[in-house]
Amino acid sequence: MKLTVCQSGGYVRCSMLFLLMLLLTSCATHRQPVALHASPQPALRVIGMPLFEDQPKIDVRRENPMYAIIGLSARLIQQMVREYHRIAYGKANPALHQHCLKSMRENIKRRLRKHGYQVRDLPMTYWQAQAAYRRKKPDLAGVDALLRVQIKRFGYFSASPFKPYRPGMVVAADLITTRDRKVLASNVYNVGYEPGDVPKFDLQIDYMTTIHVADKRFFYRNFDALIDHARESSQGLKFIASVAAESIAGDMERRSHGVVLARR
């Protein structure tokens, strides 16, 4: 059987694309946590906080494993339904997303300042901040490290038609030096979701620290129940965001050892 040049080129291009996707995925994956007390800490006084990396809408989704078996058309329908639900929930709570992010930033800054750090808000992305430091921009003068926060999922999620929608967030936080880009601290937090329901491969993570939040007041059996209680359900997401902020900032506390002693 003769293989044409076009077919051969197509196979080569597909192979190269597949390898590139694997490379990008491996670069973005959080492989293991890094504790601040276990890192060689430089003179760390000023922490810069770039913009959070997040999706434009609060996520509302229910997975159905049967769609993966049925085929592509069913998955496309599921994606359309998911987008409709996101839009509908966003209309019911138009200011909720920004409120949660703003509150989360303020809580992180307040806790970091209690730890003794100076915190500087940076109206730019993490990569823009690193580039600005290299160019000696005034905004980055004196900043010792950047706290990069990536919100990988935030909203109401149901892993199957037999499980309720529940609020949660998966967020990665990395404290990275500006001078040489060394990771001083790193963790991925799962706040609220059932651990077995979080698709690590899709979210480009290899691990996560689970923080259980199981307040059944904010569990909804289906989307109709969720949208009928949209305003009440917003309290669940606000609480999730506050817990995520406390978890991130709490790991930034300076410690001389890895053991935290309980105080009476």
Image (cartoon, helix red, strand yellow):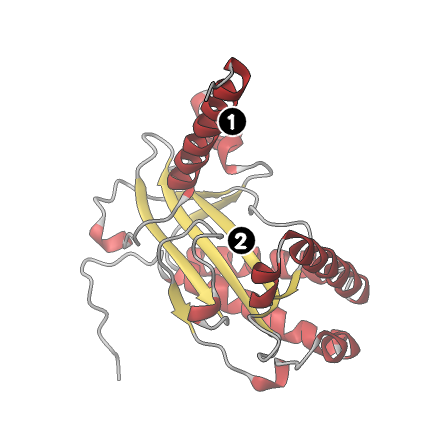
Which amino acid lies under the numbered mark 1 shown in the image of this protein?
A: Pro
Rendered location of residue 67, percent (x, y):
61, 62
Residue 138 is marked as 1
Q: Are marks 1 and 2 in contact (CB under 8 Å)?
A: no
Q: Is 257 placed above or below 19 here?
A: below
Tag 2 residue: 151
Q: Is mark 1 on a helix, strand or loop?
A: helix
Q: Is mark 2 on a helix, strand or loop?
A: strand
| Relative to 158, 192 lies left or right | left
Q: Dot 1: few (<14), some (14–19), or many (≥20) neighbours within 10 Å? A: few
Quarter of the image with the N terminus in it: top left
Give the Cα distance between marks 1 and 2: 28 Å
Q: Quadrant of residue 261?
A: bottom left
Query: Nearest the camera: 215 or 207?
Result: 207
Rendered location of residue 88, percent (x, y):
79, 63
Residue 94 is marked as none
* First reached walking from the N terminus: tag 1 or tag 2: 1
Query: Nearest the camera: 190 or 27?
Result: 27
